[in-house]
Amino acid sequence: MATQKDLSSLLRGYSALIVDPSGSIKLSIAKALKDIGIDNNRLHMAGTFEKAVHIIQKSKPEVVISEYKLDTGLGSELRNIQADHLREGRTAIFGLVAGTSNEARVAEAQEEDVDFYILKPISQQQIETLIAEAADQRMNPPPYLQKISLVRQLIDDEKYDEAHAELEQAMQMTDRPSLALYYEGLAYFKQGQVEKAIAAYHEGLQNIPLHFKCLKGLYDIYSSQKQMAKAYKVWRDLLSHYPTSPDKLTHAIRMAIETKNGDDIPDLYELYRQMDERPKSLIKVMAAALMAAAKFKINAGEVDEASELFQFAMITSEYDPPTIESIVKTLIKYREPDAAVKFLKQFPIELKNSPLFAQLDFLITKMSASPEQWIEHGRSLIKSGKADAHVFRSVIFGLSEMGKHNAAESVIGEALKVYPEQRSDFYAILDNQQARL
């Protein structure tokens, strides 16, 4: 291992960023960094994801140590931002602070992306040791990582046979060669040998079940082969074990619908609820997926489950009137007027005098009241100017059924003032009823 002098030499002139909402953890890590050679005036601290990104872009820190999950982003996402802004010729060191053993396992499985992780509760000595080991490994990579570096270059140069030969040696250098197996799979994939690539990735996952690169490699293969059911299963594994983001969750939701995995929507909704940041695009996709899952449930006769999903969809859409309209009309279609009433009651109070609310209320009345009652209800909507074409057609039909053809024709006259293009449709209702007499 490198000496203190070696580490101080490596880190001299380097800057560091510590990202954690906890002030005490930031101070502990800062002391460790100062002890191994980073100047105090080159230490930066942030408590939020946004501030961390700003500091990385401005100060270009070579060392970044972040809390596993931040307010509006993931600590691991800072790794790529750090790499994009690294000064030429400098070595990047990246670490995560994990709060649970599962977070630690996930951090460990992100080989090449995470140099080390610190599991809480942390000690000063632990911090210094882990940072020193990470810096030492950057200075003096072990033979296994030297091989991996060579293999990466060979694959970039499309020298696949040489890469496989080097990988065969690399796999003898460690007990868990998941990283080497990932690159073996990548080489095979680039050669068009898909089955061998899949086998390599699966073997890598046998060594480290959550290995990020092997999981991602499998996903890339299945996606490229249009095996979307398998791709979705791998993506769900990534989503379940790794911190997610709005874009990743949106992708998962769309894949769940595409692969007819509607039963997964409630689980994805739980992930959605846990997210601090919900862009409009994600809100729209989540609400639509909940609606689709609810319709599937009600079609299967599972009314209670459907109602729960409809409720989630309404909340997600922020009580959007078109969403409530769709819910009410679906429940009416499946002859569930009581449930329809429950959702209509949640219509935004400031819109309860709107034509849409009145029209939905009419649909419910039509299902639950006598013909005389719902016809009178419809005529009151016509008089108030809140009737749509469906209300007109319903009233015309109802009056015709009761033999009140003159009244029906009078309603047609009112309907044509609003919907002149539907003249033939309105008169067809009356003509059909008269023909039956």
Image (cartoon, rainbow, N blue to C red):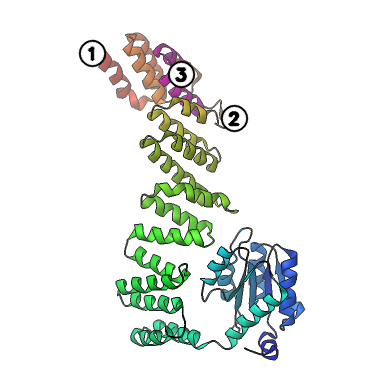
- Dot in front, 3 or 1: 1
Residue 202, by quadrant, is bottom left
The answer to which of marks 2 and 1 sits earlier in the sequence is 2
Q: Nearer the viewer, residue 304 or 15?
A: 304
Q: What residue type is labelled 1?
A: Arg
Magenta range is: 354-378
Q: Which residue is drawn at 47% across and 69% down?
A: 212
Q: Do the residues labelled 2 and 1 touch (CB within 8 Å)?
A: no
Q: Is residue 368 visible?
A: yes
Of the 4 image quadrants, the one containing the C terminus is top left
Residue at image mark 2:
349
Q: How far apart are marks 3 and 2 (CA)?
A: 22 Å
Q: Residue at x 40, y 39 (%)?
A: 297
Residue at image mark 1:
436
The answer to which of marks 3 and 2 sits earlier in the sequence is 2
Q: Nearer the viewer, residue 382 or 166?
A: 166
Q: Position of residue 314 (x, y in %)?
A: 52, 38
Q: Quick check: is 103 in the magenta stretch?
A: no
Q: Is the magenta stretch mostly helix, strand or loop?
A: helix
Q: Which amino acid does label 2 sit on?
A: Ile
Give the number of the disc on residue 382. 3
Q: Position of residue 98 (x, y in %)?
A: 62, 66
Q: Residue at x 33, y 86 (%)?
A: 161
Q: Do the residues labelled 3 and 2 touch (CB within 8 Å)?
A: no
Dot 1 crowding, Cα within 10 Å, few <14, some 14–19, many 20+: few
